[in-house]
Image (cartoon, coloured by chain):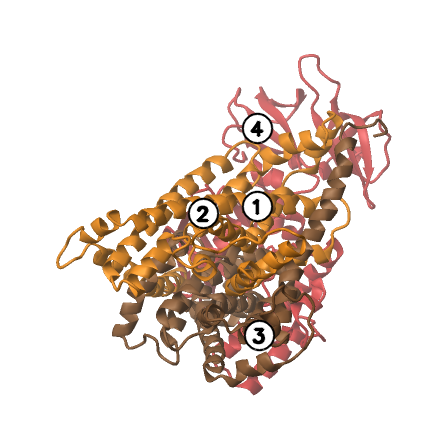
Amino acid sequence: MDALIVRNLTRIFPSGGGVRDVSLTISSGEFLVLLGPSGCGKSTLLRLIAGLDEPDSGAIEFAGAPTGAEPSARIAMVFQNLALYPHMTAFENIAFGLRLRKVPSAEIDRRVRQAAAKVGLNSGLDRRPAELSGGERQRVALARALVREPEIVLMDEALGSLDARLRAALRIELKILQRATGRTFVYVTHDQVEALAMADRLAVMRNGQIEQIGPPEEIFNHPETEFVASFVGDPAINFFAAQKAGDDIEIAGIRYPMAIAASSGAALRAGIRPADLSIDSTQGAFAIDIAIESVEFSGASFIVRGTVAPERADRHKIPICAVTSRRVAPGQTRRFFFDPAKIHLFDAASGRRLD
Amino acid sequence: MSAPVRSDRIERPLAVMRIALSAAVIAAAVVPLYLLAKQALTPELETFAWPPAWLPRDLTLRNFAAVFAVGELRGAIVRSLCVGAISAAGATVLGAMLAYAMARGGAAQRVGFAAVSGVRLLPMIAVAIPAGIMLASLGLYDTPGALGLAVIHCAIAIPTAALTLYAAFAAVPREIEEAAWLDGASPVRVFFAIDLPIVRGALSAAFVLCFILSWDEFGFALLLQQTNRTLPPLLYYYTVFGNVGPASALALLMMIPAVCVVIALGPAMRTAMVTGSSR
Amino acid sequence: MNERSRYLKGAFVAIPSLFMLAMLVVPALGGLGASFNHRGPSLENYSALVHDPMFWRAALDNLILPIASLALELAAGLGLALMLTARGKRSAVVEVAAILPFAIPEIVILTIARYLLMPRGYVNGALEAFGMHGAAWLSPRGSLAMLSVAVVDAWHVTPIVMLMLIAGLQTIPQELYEAARLDGAGTLATFRHVTLPMLAPAIVGATVLRGIDALRIFSTVLVLTGAEAVPVLSTYAYGQWTDAQAPRVAMAAAMVLAMVVTIFALAGTLAVRRWASQPGASQ
């Protein structure tokens, strides 16, 4: 069942940001993540869905009925800096919306405590936001959103103000919570690690448009555009200039025997993820030499950075990055292997994927 | 840093000047107040002495008693308190409305600032005379309750209240209001339930400033309340007619609100004073 | 949502503005109309002004007095501001004492000043005690009255000017002073070449704001010396209203004052804008 349909939504700001002709269908009960760099329009889209802003053109349909100018009671939002009412206790913050709707006191009490329990807020309901910790405040904001039992919960970089460890912990809790309540969550972030971890479906946005939407694995393994390939994945994907050379493909000046469906002479971009480059020769048929400049230890693996070897006199150094489980030393030149199936090819001009 | 600077020659006389200036400032504040207090606390005969007595010889509370015994003075005190409270309350409410709209930007801000600046320019005398005629036609001229004066004071205090509250409203994060919208609150509800409680400190400050403005106001009070006077014009007449004792006692009493505020609020008052002052 | 809050914003601007308009601007406009009315539209009232030597004296005093008062306020305010922001200990006592004259209601200041300056007042008493002669500070006959009024007015208002200049001084970056010291500038030179130019916008701002108020001087003159000794436009208008029972002439005089204030305010706003946009201007 569809929870929300966005049709050709456009909202452009004088400063240049906004969304352009965006269409989107959100399924009921899914955890949708809007991912993109700042200024890509993800927050604008969220605010348009929330009814906090009016579109220039287009429509938003809410389970069959178009949303009016009123922010619907069926939508709730958690803001980036939480926006808790500073002069009210946590309890009153959560209860505010219910009080406005003249819900009887006894029921307010029950529902507030229920919502608080659901988000793991066990104490401090009688304290003001200033007296609560960052994590507790987060839970209050979440409880405030959930207590009205909305159909859609919107979150705008909601974990952004927390430290890394708390973020990671709350991320998991949020996901479990969403599964448990079965509500539709739309979550905005610029952090692709978070996006890949939490999303049922992921929409990558750029310049006011959705470049690609799909399950995280699909976005990661099968990026439709160069932008999506480079934005998702950490360390970022390696890109090289490439072109067809007869029955081969030339990547970074090195010829590999692989036939591709492209016109000769067309400028292409070949992407290889650092994790797909391995020092183990069994991991791939193709090889590339790297003159290693630095090796970063990151716990489970090493991030190797260097340049493609041998260096050509007529070309500047080509940077390359690989992730390997075995230690290598800087200053060496080592051979790395990769599977030809893991090459992502894009047309250099349009950025679109070639298959 | 170790080389002798030519400025050393001026440093010492400057330091002396500094001390002298500090002493002069303190004296300029303390001595007149002391003399006033002395006049208030000694019998009138002493005050009329020549050469003037610098130290009190006979302390008495008779002058203060006289202030509270004379009906006219009692009435004026009550009237000033009422006019001050009513006009300050009205100005705080209306000023809050104006400041809120101005803080949200756009055309409201420009119109608001224009209105506030324009009103502050009007000379009292140009407004008071026709305003008196207008109040007379409404039956509010020179009434015992001084409602007409309260209304006028309210109007002239609005700019002060608005400027004091503007910064406070501007500091309320937009998102808190948006959260309230999403919770289902109407814009009016948001103003009363969310914004006002958050700025309640500034509301008190605005109220106090407007009260003092009304309490001190002389021009409109003189012109609009001929017989049912408030304190400032009354003090003027008492001084001019030579009732030194009661006049000094009254003057001392009149100082109470403002001096309390200055001592209590200190640094905060400084900025408030700069924005709220006008003749 | 934005639409409804737009209505609220509109109402919140309209209600207070209309209230101020009705209570203050409408009467003033009524007065303007009345000033041009003498049994029908006419310039009779203004003509009466032009033919009254007292009016011209009031107009003149209304220009000289603010200049004198401003000069005193600026000098004293600057001195106090420099003193209070100088290096070394800041005394709370001095700060409170400096602000006190403004905290006290104006009528009380004027009352105190009367008792100080009257012929058998404290100032003359002190002078006699030191073997000098007292003076007729407030008398209509002497020329000291204007000076007395200017001094008392300045005394009341100097704290405000001081606060504005302190704010201006605090925007001057410390590094400028240090650079000047390294360049070998002494105290006076630093003042002339660093402090004063950087303070210029604040001084201009203070002059405009206090100038507007100084032009409208009323209670100071009325209470201290009475209108005969130092007539100004507002007391002249007041006199026409109460003593001469000529309300329309009073309005005409008031309108002249209003016009002077408006012209000064406009000129002042332009001056402030010009000065505030100068490079190196601190505001």
Single out the mark in the foreground, 4 or 2. Answer: 2
Residue A36 got which mark?
A: 1
Q: Chain of mark 3?
A: B
CB contact under 8 Å: marks 3 and 1: no
**Does dot 3 land on a helix, a strand or a loop?**
helix
> Disc 4 marks which residue?
A260
Kindly report which numbered mark, 2 or 1, lies closer to the viewer in this rendering.
2
For marks 3 and 1, give the CA distance.
73 Å
Q: Which amino acid, mark 1?
A: Gly
Foreground residue among C133 and B73: C133
What is the distance, in whole Å, between disc 4 and disc 2 at their CAs? 93 Å
Q: Is residue C59 above or below residue B276?
A: above
The tint of chain B in the picture is brown
Q: Do the numbered discs 4 and 1 sit on residues whose CB atoms are within 8 Å?
A: no
- For the residues tagged 4 and 1, is the chain the same? yes
Residue A120 image position (x, y, % from top left): 70, 71
Chain ID, red in image:
A
C173 to C224, vertically: above or below: above
SS state under label 4: loop
Question: Alpha-carbon neighbours of circle 2 within 10 Å: few (<14), some, or many (≥20)?
Answer: many
Question: Any mark on residue A169, and which?
Answer: none
Which residue was labeled with disc 2?
A: C65
Residue A94 falls left or right of residue C225: right
Check whether the beta carbons of the residues at disc 4 and disc 2 lie within 8 A of each other: no
Q: Quadrant of residue C74?
A: top right
Kindly report the distance in space between the C-alpha atoms of the residues bearing marks 3 and 4: 103 Å
Q: Amino acid at mark 3?
A: Ala
Q: Are marks 3 and 1 on the same chain?
A: no
The amino acid sitting under disc 4 is: Ile
> How far across and how far down the image is residue C65, in percent?
45, 47
